[in-house]
Image (tube, rainbow, N blue to C red):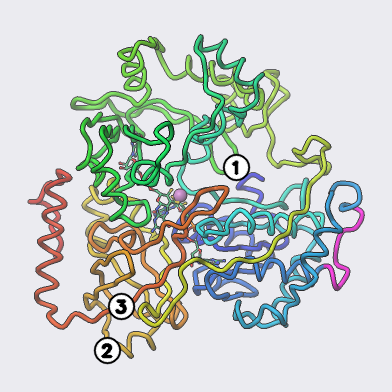
Amino acid sequence: MGVHEIEDAALLFVFGYHGAESHPIVARRIVRAKQKGAKIICVDPRRIETARIADMHLQLKGGSNLLLVNALANVILEEGLCDYDFIEKHANGFDEFKEVIKKYTPESVTAQTRVEAADIRKAARMYALSGRSMILYGMGVCQFGQAVDVVKGLANLAIMTGNFGRPSVGIGPVRGQNNVQGACDMGALPNVYPGYQSVTVPEVRAKFEKAWGVKLSDQPGFTLTMVPHQVLHETDPKKQVHAYYIMGEDPAQSDPDLAEVREALEKCDFVVLQDIYMNKTGQYADVILPATGWCEHDAVYSCCDRGFQKARKLVEPSGDVKTDWEIISLVSTAMGYPMSYKNTVEIWNEVIELCPGFAGATDEKIEKNVCVQWPCRSKEDHDKGTSFLHKDGKFAHPDGRAKFFATDWRPPLELENELYPLTLSTVREVGHYSVRTMTGNCRTLRNLEDEPGWIQMNPADCEVLGLAEGELVKVLSKRGYCITRCLPTGRVAKGAVYMTYQWWIGACNELTIGNFDPISKTPEYKYCACKVEKIEDQAWAEKHVREEYELIRGRMGIDMKEGRAA
Ligand SMILES: Nc1nc2c(c(=O)[nH]1)N[C@H]1C(S)=C(S)[C@@H](COP(=O)(O)OP(=O)(O)OC[C@H]3O[C@@H](n4cnc5c(=O)[nH]c(N)nc54)[C@H](O)[C@@H]3O)O[C@H]1N2
Ligand SMILES: Nc1nc2c(c(=O)[nH]1)N[C@H]1C(S)=C(S)[C@@H](COP(=O)(O)OP(=O)(O)OC[C@H]3O[C@@H](n4cnc5c(=O)[nH]c(N)nc54)[C@H](O)[C@@H]3O)O[C@H]1N2
Ligand SMILES: [Mo]
């Protein structure tokens, strides 16, 4: 669906998504939906902003998503709240689905989800009966070892209640970065060319081979998160990774289990970093290729709602930098495959020529209509793109029907235990962005919030350890430790702590675990076991943090004279 459709839903089911911190502009749409009379159900283990304006907050225990989703489906089935006509006309696999779901009664999941059976029943009824229910989900779904199954579980809810194929319904992954959708659209995935065309389909491969005048492999590559394993532990020489070309990513800050990432970067024979700032990974790079930032070049972005939008160059870049596409062209030319694009429009024309789903999204059309959502197949003016998918119940499977898919819940890999009694979940904060190269280089934002960040803890857990707000603490897991500040808050449940992954010193990825969803290969950033230790010598700790910060800022080339932390 289009982002604007959020406002007109009759019910918003916000599941593991914290718009107020992550996407304040999208969050405005949620507030407006509320003002227009929508009901809101928030499913989050924390009392986030959405929970405060919601009609229901299901404060489940982290890691229990699929139990809750299956139990919601169970109620919808048991109480006959399905849209049977929609199911019959547009879906397959209903009987097998019912078989799996029937044991997930609300009572059977209460102990593990910590959500009352009566609340599960009430939420299921509200979702099924609103007439226009829209699901929004985020990293609270995706960052688990069992992630894709939960997405399919949410899709089941939408199929069984006929909430697909009309405006303001459906299931919306509110994708992370401003152009993460675009990166996928352009084929920055291991198994597809641009336009989601599979590398294993011979006709597709033949088309790209002809267009590019090369021979292409029929084997999918690796996902980013698999690289440390492919460098350190792969025994098949054909699958070992020896060189790593990193463009716009900082694995030494953003990947799980940083000790392992550092080992891999050190062992890798050749590392290239193409970035607009120095970052932690840059310290392991053999070559650094400096690129221009977003207002220094022309570009096309895809929003999370599949909308192509143009971004224009506003300022002339200064210093020894080039645009990303020029750098790629030069490297390619030097390696023996000449590329001679003159501008981004030329590149865009090649994209739409090779991708049937984007074929109609011409540069002129995006220019004229501001935003064109794919699929847009015809260059004719009348094809303005597609606001919502699955119109008239037509789905992407070859027979045009949706498919129910249900499976059993799997617990997270590393559960709380005697040595590490707390669960750690890692999230975002509004004032800083991902690996903080961009916002950490901005003095105003640093003045609002600076190293070493915070750990959100329930006041009862703080009391046990004798911790006060602002005190520096040591957080440890089986894999490493870091130092951060204690933030007592009733927004989180007892036994569960939360850190944001933006901090270089309070770097929670020293602690996180490399457990991956088998399909998406997304790490379990939202669950591992940890413990918090009091630091008796606070003066030492404050000095240590200051010194570490100066060291890192020195390596990153951030001017030490201005904007020093107070
Ligand atoms: N200011 C700022 N904005 C950002 C970013 C940033 O770094 N800073 N990063 C961008 C990126 S890359 C992304 S991907 C998006 C992500 O944006 P969101 O999807 O909102 O990501 P998170 O805040 O990590 O997690 C969402 C919620 O999941 C909840 N959660 C944790 N465990 C569970 C669970 O077991 N079940 C459920 N149902 N919920 C759970 C958390 O409490 C949290 O409130 O934000 C983007 N926007
Ligand atoms: N613990 C924990 N870890 C997480 C997460 C979590 O929730 N918890 N979230 C994960 C998620 S969802 C994401 S998306 C990742 C994000 O992690 P990363 O992708 O590593 O972080 P970003 O800050 O988005 O940007 C990476 C680099 O891109 C550079 N960059 C910005 N613009 C450009 C450009 O135009 N060209 C080039 N060449 N470079 C540019 C930045 O300077 C930065 O160094 O982190 C993941 N890591
Ligand atoms: Mo993300």
Kindly identify which residue carries mark 3: 532
- Left/right placement of residue 423 relative to residue 263 reads right
Q: Does residue 399 belong to the magenta stretch?
A: no
Residue 173: mark in rendering: none
Q: Closer to us: mark 2 or mark 3?
A: 3
Rendered position, 145 above or below 487: above
Residue 556, image x, y percentages: 17, 45
The reply to whether callout 2 and callout 3 are in contact (CB within 8 Å) is no
* Label 3, residues with CA under 10 Å away: few <14, some 14-19, many ≥20: many
Q: Report how far apart the C-alphas of labels 1 and 2 lie in the structure.
A: 47 Å
User: Which comes sooner in the sequence, label 2 or label 3?
Assistant: 2
The reply to whether callout 1 and callout 2 are in contact (CB within 8 Å) is no
Rendered position, 183 above or below 418: above
Segment tinted magenta in the rendering: 77-85
Residue 215, image x, y percentages: 51, 14
Asked whether residue 353 is in view, the answer is no
Residue 305: mark in rendering: 1
Label 3 element class: strand
Task: Name the residue: 44% across, 76% down.
Answer: 416
Q: Which quadrant is the N terminus positioned in? A: top right
- Left/right placement of residue 367 relative to residue 203 reads left
Kindly identify which residue carries mark 2: 466
* Label 1, residues with CA under 10 Å away: few <14, some 14-19, many ≥20: many
Asked whether residue 440 is in view, the answer is yes
